[in-house]
Amino acid sequence: MALSAFAERAPIAIDGVFEDWADVPVAYSDAEDQVGAGQVDFLNLWLADDEDFLFFRLESAQEFDSSENNQVILYIDADDNPATGLAIGGIGAEVEWRLGSRRGTVYLTGGGTVSFNYRDIRFRGAPTVDALEFEFAVGRNEIIAETGFTMRILWLDEGSGDTLPDSGETLSYTFDEGNALPPLNLLSFERDKLEDLRIATYNVLFDNLFNPNAQPGFRRQIQAVAPDIINFQEIFSNTAADTRNLISQWLPLPEGESWHVDGGFVPNNDTITVSRYPILDTWQLFGSNTTTGNLAVLLDTEAALERKLLLINAHLPSGSNETARQQEIDLIMAFIRDAKEEGGVVTVEPDTPIVVVGDLNLVGRSQQLQTLLDGDIQDETTFGSDVFPDWDGSNLTDLISRHTDAPMGYTWRNDGESLGFWPGHLDFVIYSDSVLETGNHFIVYTPDMSSDRLSTYGLSGGDSNVSDHMMVVGDFRIPAVDVLGGTDITSVPGWRRSPWYGDYYVGSYPWIFHNEHGWQWIYPGSTSDIVYIFDHGFDQWLFTNESVYRFMFVFGPPGEEAWIWSFPDNTPELRHFFNFGTDQLFSIPPQN
């Protein structure tokens, strides 16, 4: 049976987040089967495309690592002709891509084969840890045949024998050539708010920060980003003082201020944190006998956040060293537990923001990321009991970013790497969202950027090539207290709903756009009992609160102050009120 998936143009970002697939229908759904250990049972497949890529979203019944230790194969019949290529599953596949070995084969017309790796088809994938669901991308120009824009797709797990689509069926996909997507939203390097605290993390590849040939690229990036706190990994042969001196030259501070630095002075700890805010205390965190370490610092960020900041700069063991990586994560979570409880090695004040950054090397087991988020310590005999890491008893939050100029979320890329791993998300920013709010955040990858964009930020196209990792940047602030008592409306980003004041947009807070009253400014000194509002339509100050609304008190010149009643059918375009001082109805704007 021949099945066709409807062409879907969609703005997909390969970042391991699937919200951008919401409007893409399932292309094929398969019933769950019983398979053996280490085998894969496919469930659902989604297909989409844009001008550059063919996208796959693949769901399975078992977690697996997409980049190794699996027997999953993607077959593409690029010319939609079963008589050419490798005969398998009712199609003629020109392209065979084995995810577990990261190797592919092209089957040529007339016989013969050519081997290739991920670079040749621009293969991208996320997440990098074990998962039930993945998203992948393959370059369009690399797989489209000259004969047209229709191809057939087959997924196979050689271990279980499961195929998608099922045996006896074929699935074709035709690229959507008629619907152009809007241009990608290019992310600015600027802060959303000038007062936001900017934190960056950067693995600089074996002290390459001090390589004279690489320094111009590092300098331009650091100057373009201008972080307040920058966390380096892989500085083995240079000191913390050396690092501070370099940043002081590249980012000079105003007179009377100086950069502060810590880390890197204990053998095998390659993490160094440079901060424009004073470092009050520091701890070296070693959870395993590896050649990297982790650094925790307590920063005096009162000027930016009205409280101190507990920051952990981590460089976890890489590759297949799963046990050591989990041990280090367990230790980090034990340290956070200790910091939140009185009487330990470190105790911080309640609601002290917690941020974990660095090259976390999260590949393989998903439990490692899960522990970092939910505090589920695996070796409780050594590291103690689990911890609820955020101050409200919830998980920490993974700040998932993308490249400023491309729909990709990878932070590591090494096209010359001999094992053939495709670009992956290895560098993280994880934070306590109960006491921190994010602003702008992004990944710097200059080869993505146009000449105009590079010029805007004083960059060169090859600057990111000074390391195999990319700089990851996140801006933070203390959340504004919503005296209206609103909660997020998840279906409408930027809007909140108050149980007594209705719906309003907070993207420009303390300015809000109310669904009845239009633009209003919430006085920052307001409380839940006393809410002062400057109403743009009135051009006057108002008072109200949960107990009295829909009554509102209008301030004005002597003799014109009055209590008014706001009718519930008001709109920003036309509002009706009753004035108890004049005993009259009136409208904003006035009506004849």
Image (cartoon, rainbow, N blue to C red):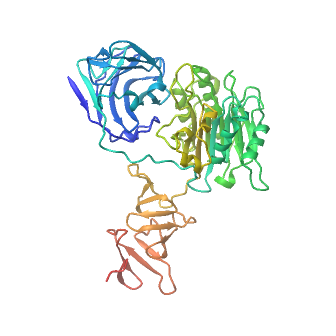
Relative to residue 124, is residue 459 drawn left or right? right
* Residue at the farthest bottom position: 559
- Give how far across and how far down residue 551 sits, in percent: 41, 73
- Give how far across and how far down residue 60 sits, in percent: 37, 25
Relative to residue 465, is residue 112 drawn left or right? left
In the picture, residue 577 is in which quadrant?
Answer: bottom left
Nearest the eye: 282 or 209:
209
- Give how far across and how far down residue 517 sits, in percent: 40, 68
Does residue 584 sit above or below 325 in this rendering? below
Residue at 33% from the left image edge and 80% from the top image edge: 591
How many numbered marks, from 0 up? 0
Does residue 75 sit above or below 577 in this rendering? above
- Can residue 342 be seen here? The reply is no
In the picture, residue 286 is in which quadrant?
Answer: top right
* Residue at the farthest left position: 1
Residue at 38% from the left image edge and 32% from the top image edge: 140
Relative to residue 559, is residue 386 drawn left or right? right
Nearest the eye: 522 or 53:
53
In the picture, the quarter occupied by the C terminus is bottom left
Nearest the eye: 81 or 295:
81
Residue at 78% from the left image edge and 34% from the top image edge: 239
- Give how far across and how far down residue 486 sits, in percent: 45, 57
- Can residue 174 be seen here? The reply is yes
In the picture, the quarter occupied by the N terminus is top left
In the picture, residue 165 is in which quadrant?
Answer: top left
